[in-house]
Amino acid sequence: MTAHDIEHVELYASDEQAVAEYFVSSFGFAQIANSVSDERSSVLLQQGAVRLVVTGGRATEAFLDQHGDGIADIAFACDDVARTVSNAVAAGASVISPEPDRPVVSGFGDTRHTLVTRSAEPGLPTDRSWRPGQVTSAHAAGRVLTRAAGRIRLLDHVAVCVAGGTLEDCANFYTDGFGLGRYSSEHTEIGSQAMNSVVVRSPSGGITFTLLEPDLAKKPGQLDAFLSRNAGPGVQHLAFGVDDIVSAVHHFRDRRVEFLQTPATYYEMLAGRLPGIRSEIADLRAADVLADRDEWGYLLQLFTRSRCERNTLFYELVQRRGARGFGSANIKALYEAVERDRLTIR
């Protein structure tokens, strides 16, 4: 009756092989298996505890036409699949596929949740046939991809953007339907814009959703722009947990990952705000990494630029030195960084 962990995340892509190659050569994911049928072509990637399924083909066309490249499924590992389905339906979900071993229910927008039985070792998704090993296709024929060194340990959180005025309903849907608990909530104002956020988390900590909505009483900003480009609610970013964010940023940047830039003025104020990391500020500045702290410790973060044609889905690197939250000052700084980038490229 409770969802505990994210089994895998499925990303629909118009060019799934190019996206898979990016995750392998730039972020260091390993190709575990691939699946090819008349309806779809999928690649299963893994690094640390993160499992990504990248899928293209006819079965994805309706989603891609509506939203562009994006997260279509976040699979949950549950302690009791049947009861979780019942709770989700009672909370407002619809059953998309009633397969008893692997039912699929609706989530936010057009993103769904496949539900599987929790086990010590996640297996291959059983809704398609898989072949272990390297991707083989016309796109990648004759090439062996060079894998970046593995630096990602886990999926720290999933950030979800929902329409203004729907945040509370969405948070209640996940607490009532999937047994996630409310961890925190925040109202953030940036100039004439503002957003509200609620964090929901599973008892194991294996699922953390940061739910975001624009404040309708303020001027439109990046969340409104995301909802427009994405044609509705969706995953705004995936946050990958790393052990050493500064070295990871330099490593990934060398492998063509584009990160957002942080103004020099941010670091001029950082020493006074966080004197405990004064000796590291030069290194943080060189990598554009943001820093904050809560009562438990420090939090270091940085966003990538979106590679999607609609400038929607992007990624984040997170290093936690004891911190359990998301850092109020960083929420504002991250918002401002995305807003600067949005205004530059639109």
Image: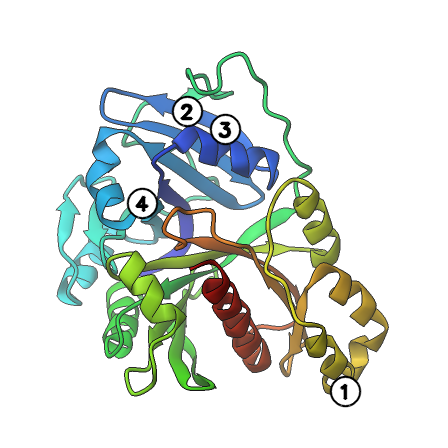
Horizontal and vertical percent for residue 288? 69, 63
Tell me, for residue 32, which label it has, or none: 3
Q: Relative to 103, is 30 on the left or the right?
A: right
**Numbered disc in front, either 1 or 4:** 1
Horizontal and vertical percent for residue 104? 22, 46
Q: Nearer the viewer, residue 1 or 126?
A: 126
Task: First in sequence, mark 1 or 3: give its number.
Answer: 3
Residue contact between numbered discs 1 and 3, judged by CB atoms under 8 Å? no
What whole-number distance in Å separates the C-alpha atoms at marks 2 and 1? 50 Å
Horizontal and vertical percent for residue 235? 36, 57
Q: Taking 137 as reference, is 15 above or below it?
A: below
Q: Amino acid at mark 2?
A: Asn
Q: Amino acid at mark 4?
A: Val
Considering the numbered disc 4 on the image, is that residue within a helix, a strand or a loop?
A: strand
Which residue corresponds to mark 1? 272
Tell me, for residue 116, which label it has, or none: 4
Residue contact between numbered discs 1 and 4, judged by CB atoms under 8 Å? no
Q: Taking 36 as reference, is 105 above or below it?
A: below
Is residue 12 visible to the viewer in this orientation of the structure?
Answer: yes
